Amino acid sequence: MDRAEVLLIGGRAGVGKTTVGWEVSALLRAAAVPHAVIDGDFMGQVHPAPQGDPDRSEITESNLTAVWANFARRGYRRLIYTNTASVLPEAAGMFERAMGAGVRIVRVLLTASDATARQRLVGRELGSELETELQASMRKARLLDERAPEDAVRVVTDGRLVVDIAREVAAATGWTANSAFHSGG
């Protein structure tokens, strides 16, 4: 396979993007499917924002391009990328520029109720930013619900085991035909 492929896992804070991304990776490793994983939150994690790049999109794209180039040079063609807004239509250009024209993009939008997201964030956010995260999570959930494209596979995470969610997410890629992988056995 020469063409690059990327699984974009998006969703509000507290929906389980990183956890699901790592579990998808575990399923792919078990099925011997070569891939790389990037947590997109780290690609633009600088303070203050670079001059002329207030939303950190240029530094994020630059870092993604560099990291993907390292993976691609070593033969990897599949990427799992987790980030809140990665599933939005405007993100596609960044992946085309970073990974090459014609990259196959699979979008998965993880969803969770406000109560579920709150419960998860309360358990995770031990510092001073809990209230900010809760408010931002609710805002982003509404934005993602309104703007995620039709081709985004929506996966509900409320009350489900991470392995079951990951199986559903991984199945959307078609990266393996292993029946045990799809059926959960």
Image (cartoon, rainbow, N blue to C red):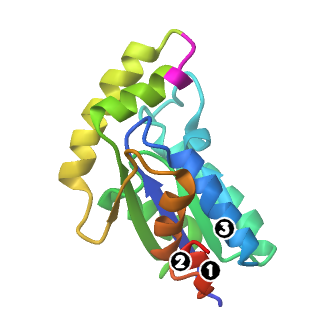
Is residue 113 among the parts visible in the rendering?
A: yes
Numbered mark located on residue 183 in the image: 2
Q: Residue 152 in the image: state x and y as whole percent.
A: 32, 66
Within-10-Å neighbours for mark 3: few <14, some 14–19, many 20+: some
Between tags 1 and 3, which lies in front? 1
Where is mark 3, residue-wise? 27
Q: Quadrant of the N terminus?
A: bottom right
Kindly give the residue lying farthest to the left in the view shown: 146
Q: Amino acid at mark 1?
A: Ala
Residue 4: image quadrant is bottom right
The tally of labels here is: 3
Where is mark 1, residue-wise? 180
Q: Amino acid at mark 2?
A: Ser
Residue at 46% in and 44% down: 57
Q: What SS does tag 1 mark?
A: helix
Residue range in magenta is: 123-127
Q: Quick check: marks 2 and 1 in contact, CB under 8 Å?
A: yes
